[in-house]
């Protein structure tokens, strides 16, 4: 075990150099010729969507089905992380989980996406005779689906089970390559393992792209909100300064570790979000929000398989579903590592329930409150939200909604605060996960955590300085990086049940049935 411990605490300079160098190269090429870089990434994006889109849809569906099946099976009682009692309370634990995916796009997408799907009904449900009122439910349901059960399941269910088994139960480093341990064995952790090094490197690049993009999106959101509330010019310079400021907060949080800064920011995040939801429910269209949430959730469940496997309009899929699936898959290994770190002492059933059921329902309700309010005001006064959305983009959607709500300025300021905390939470959790990948240790050096947080912010600010089109290029790049990561996240679909069975035996939850052998059979086998 000493050898494993020593190996775990070393910095993997190969992974650090190649992944960091790749990000710097991406930045330099964007600075030198952003148009050419955009063309390359766009071509790669089209290739990824065309040849991997269907695979990603099947992968996410299979991950969700296997995860829920494990939770409902006798293996659901298996305790993870070799700890009898959980380290964190339910609220703290779920708060940190919620502030992973939801923090990446909870404000930016919650206001705009339902309106987009309302204005142009998703092709699976498009009907020329549909009225505006009838378009609300399928539009909201499509947003629920994109931020719902399968999206969350790919982040912290079957891969997390395998990671926790390899790290806490077997004592190997907590790295993306550990996902392959039950299939490849101990050799995956060898320094000369090309497969292991590749798994770590592509995971770092994918999560970096998936983090820098949301920092840029949310930086645009904050810049627009500052202009709306305080008349501060919404320029590239302002947006870049905002990102640098926010990522500095994230760096301080990351430096204090999971048990202090990250946990504190997550609890603040959820607390403010709950206050805003209650405020919107009281001041906004209360019954419309509740009715729409219930109806859209039911609609999603009724059409879950159709939405999961829809392959009709490739252009629409590439812009929406496949883009989201690629983004979330890129996050997958890093998110699974972070959730592994905070889930010791939890059972498989609790893990699946929190990540694949509770988190999606909370996300969907958040979308119903924010986006549903926008739908109500758009129905009442066509153009009230869509005009700002079409003219300025998603950053304008939240403020357009707030203009319709009583005490709108106060609510807008609240959303600004939540966005600020969301940016910090996204940067600190992912910089922590990357630092863990580089070292294999759940307590990586503070300087490493701070370095990655500042690097994410620096690249996002620089890309914004080049122009918003660079953020769009990065958005496409997110999907491209998901191609190799999705191959890494495939084995846990069949490895997680095997690992769960091994742990169940170790914990005495199941016993192997001994089949009695007759004397004649013994003599026959001996001869």
Image (cartoon, grey):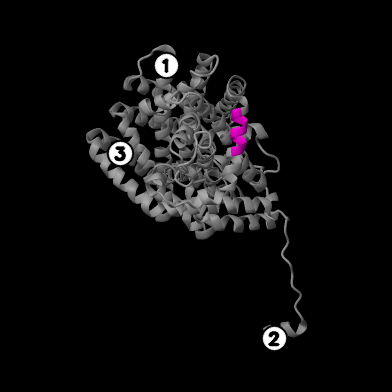
Helix, strand or loop for disc 3: helix
From this viewpoint, is residue 191 visible?
Answer: no
Per the picture, the main secondary structure of the magenta-coloured stretch is helix
Q: Are marks 2 and 3 in contact (CB under 8 Å)?
A: no
Q: Looking at this view, is 75 or 103 the one in front?
A: 103
Residue tagged 1: 228
Mark 1 vs mark 3: which is more N-terminal?
3
**Percent from the top left, x then y, of residue 460?**
36, 30
**Percent from the top left, x then y, of residue 466?**
28, 29
Q: Which image quarter: residue 96?
A: top right
Residue tagged 2: 524
Magenta region: which residues? 288-295
Helix, strand or loop for disc 2: helix
Q: Which mark is residue 26?
A: 3
Residue 76's place in the image compared with 406, above or below, is below
Mark 2 vs mark 3: which is more N-terminal?
3
Residue 223's place in the image compared with 109, above or below, is above
Asked whether, in this view, residue 85 is left or right of residue 484, the answer is: right
Quarter of the image with the C terminus is bottom right
Residue 451's place in the image compared with 162, above or below, is above
Which residue: 67% across, 35% down? 90
Which residue: 45% across, 23% down? 384
**Percent from the top left, x then y, of residue 482?**
41, 47
Number of numbered discs overlaid on the protein picture: 3
The stretch drawn in magenta includes residue 291: yes
The answer for how far apart the CA atoms under marks 2 and 3 are is: 68 Å
Mark 2 vs mark 1: which is more N-terminal?
1
* Nearer mark to the viewer, of 2 and 1: 1
Which residue: 55% across, 15% down? 406
Helix, strand or loop for disc 1: helix
Asked whether, in this view, residue 504 is left or right of residue 265, the answer is: right
């Amino acid at each position: 075990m000493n050898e494993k411990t020593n190996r775990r605490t070393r910095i993997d300079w190969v992974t650090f150099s190649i992944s960091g160098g790749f990000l710097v190269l991406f930045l330099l090429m964007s600075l030198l010729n952003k148009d050419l870089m955009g063309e390359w990434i766009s071509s790669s994006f089209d290739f990824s969507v065309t040849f991997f889109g269907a695979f990603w849809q099947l992968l996410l569906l299979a991950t969700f089905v296997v995860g829920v099946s494990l939770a409902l099976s006798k293996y659901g009682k298996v305790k993870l992380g070799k700890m009898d009692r959980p380290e964190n309370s339910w609220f703290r634990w779920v708060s940190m989980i919620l502030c992973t995916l939801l923090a990446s796009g909870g404000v930016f997408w919650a206001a705009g996406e339902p309106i987009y799907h309302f204005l142009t009904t998703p092709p699976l449900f498009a009907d020329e005779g549909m009225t505006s009122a009838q378009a609300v439910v399928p539009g909201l349901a499509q947003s629920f689906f994109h931020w719902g059960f399968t999206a969350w399941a790919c982040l912290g269910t079957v891969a997390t089970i395998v990671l926790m088994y390899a790290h806490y139960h077997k004592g190997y480093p907590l790295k993306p390559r550990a996902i392959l341990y039950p299939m490849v064995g101990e050799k995956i952790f060898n320094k000369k393992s090309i497969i292991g090094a590749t798994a770590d490197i592509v995971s770092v690049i994918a999560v970096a792209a998936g983090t820098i993009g949301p920092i840029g999106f949310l930086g645009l959101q904050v810049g627009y909100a500052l202009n709306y509330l305080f008349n501060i010019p919404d320029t590239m310079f302002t947006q870049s300064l905002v990102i640098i400021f926010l990522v500095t907060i994230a760096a301080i949080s990351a430096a204090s570790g999971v048990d202090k800064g990250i946990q504190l920011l997550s609890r603040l995040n959820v607390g403010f979000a709950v206050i805003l939801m209650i405020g919107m429910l009281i001041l906004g269209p209360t019954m419309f929000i509740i009715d729409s949430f219930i109806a859209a959730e039911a609609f999603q469940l009724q059409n879950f398989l159709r939405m999961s496997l829809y392959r009709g309009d490739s252009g629409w899929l590439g812009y929406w579903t496949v883009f989201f699936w690629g983004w979330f898959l890129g996050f997958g290994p890093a998110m699974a590592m972070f959730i592994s770190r905070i889930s010791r002492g939890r059972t498989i059933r609790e893990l699946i329930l929190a990540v694949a059921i509770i988190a999606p329902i909370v996300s969907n309700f958040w979308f119903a409150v924010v986006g549903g309010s926008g739908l109500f005001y758009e129905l009442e006064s066509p153009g009230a939200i869509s005009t700002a959305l079409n003219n300025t983009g998603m950053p304008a959607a939240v403020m357009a909604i707030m203009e319709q709500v009583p005490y709108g300025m106060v609510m807008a300021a609240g959303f600004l605060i939540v966005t600020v905390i969301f940016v910090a939470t996204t940067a600190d959790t992912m910089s922590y996960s990357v630092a863990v990948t580089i070292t294999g240790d759940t307590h990586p050096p503070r300087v490493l955590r701070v370095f990655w947080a500042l690097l994410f912010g620096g690249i996002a600010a620089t890309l914004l300085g080049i122009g918003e089109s660079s953020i769009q290029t990065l958005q496409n790049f997110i999907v491209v990086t998901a191609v190799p990561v999705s191959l890494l996240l495939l084995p846990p679909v069949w490895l997680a049940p095997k690992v769960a069975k091994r742990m169940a035996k170790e914990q005495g939850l199941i016993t192997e049935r001994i089949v009695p052998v007759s004397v004649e059979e013994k003599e026959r086998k001996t001869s």
